[in-house]
Image (cartoon, helix red, strand yellow):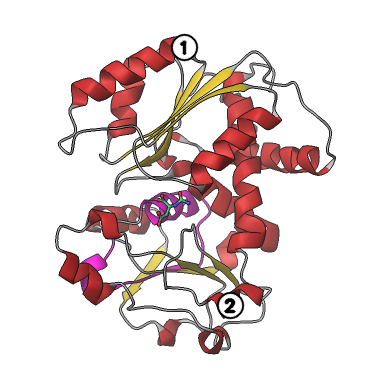
Amino acid sequence: MRAKSLYGRDILTISDLKKDEVVLILETSRKMQSLVQSHKPSTLLTGKIMTALFYEPSSRTFGSFISAMQRLGGGIIPLQGVAYSSVVKGETLRDTVETFSKLSDIVVIRHPQEGSARIAAEVSSVPVINAGDGPGEHPTQALLDLFTITAHFKDISKLTITFAGDLLYGRTVHSLVALLSLYQPREVRLVSPNELRMPPRRVQKIKASGVNVRETQNFEEILEDTDVLYMTRVQKERFDDPLSYERLKDRFRITGKIMKDLKGTAILLHPFPRVTEIAREVDRDLRAVYLREQIPNGMYVRMALLSLILDSKQ
Ligand code: NCD
């Protein structure tokens, strides 16, 4: 079955997407990859403008949305480091989004408050893409992670996928486990210190979809039959208490020695930025795909999303 279209749609959480729509995004991403690799200029989105409204720090997501739009011939309003009061006032966000929705054809938003993208979509007269809403979700990262996984493995139902680190605040993991449940992997393993376990309602949701979920704090014992290892950063900015951050930040660390326990066919992902959770020596390992593959894939997937949402003929 083929998805009709994503034209004019918001992407706020992964649950907004049905499987056939995800398949369409992945197919379109592959076309975008060929387009970029052919070095041919594109005018697909000429005349369209994207606002990138980022209230939280970002390098890769911001950069790849900007690059994606420009590679398709579109224009940009890049707003990074937007000042905001520490107590987020819904009204201010609403006014800002409404303003930029009048100036552009799509608004990409990153904001520290969970649910902010949905508030933005309520007031926006153009489609909204969530580029991270606090500890909530980060659906475009999940799509690029899935795109990366499918380049290595044809059948996700055979995979054991292990997530490690900050599963409480790590929004990329929240979106990716929800997305993977559409593909029913053999097992999802969640490895975190007790304080950083994935919120129970999210774990419940994956279990309810029929996926086998195993939660543990013991990293070493679950590595050897892992096919995809997804590391995350402990999200310092979400901690009220700096001491608990210090205590938890280095709990799991991938080194060259740990990589020896991982299958030869396994892959190691990380949404980046990394702090100390993956040693630099690991970058040379061919199974480490975070720099070589996830970064360019992020651009292809965002090109696909922008074209599907903004071009009625896609
Ligand atoms: C992630 C994020 O912002 O959630 N980064 C990204 O978008 N690639 C992960 C993180 O900040 O740790």
Note whether 221 is above or below 138 in the view shown: below
Note whether 26 is above or below 73 in the view shown: below
Q: Is residue 155 visible?
A: no
Residue drawn 42% across and 86% down? 220
Q: Give the side of residue 34 with respect to residue 86, left or right.
A: right
At label 1, the amino acid type is Leu
In the image, 269 versus 58, the foreground residue is 58
In the image, 237 versus 170, the foreground residue is 237
At label 2, the amino acid type is Val
Give residue 9's position: percent from left, percent from top.
49, 23
**Which residue position holds label 2?**
282
Give residue 223's position: percent from left, percent from top.
48, 82
**Which residue position holds label 1?**
103
Note whether 184 is above or below 68 in the view shown: below
The picture quadrant where one finds residue 244 is bottom left
Q: Is mark 2 within 8 Å of ligand 1?
A: no
Label 1, residues with CA under 10 Å away: few <14, some 14-19, many ≥20: some
Q: Give the side of residue 119 with respect to residue 162, left or right.
A: left
SS of the residue at dot 2?
Answer: helix
* Stretch of the chain drawn in magenta: 171-198
Residue drawn 58% across and 62% down? 290
Q: Is residue 272 visible?
A: yes
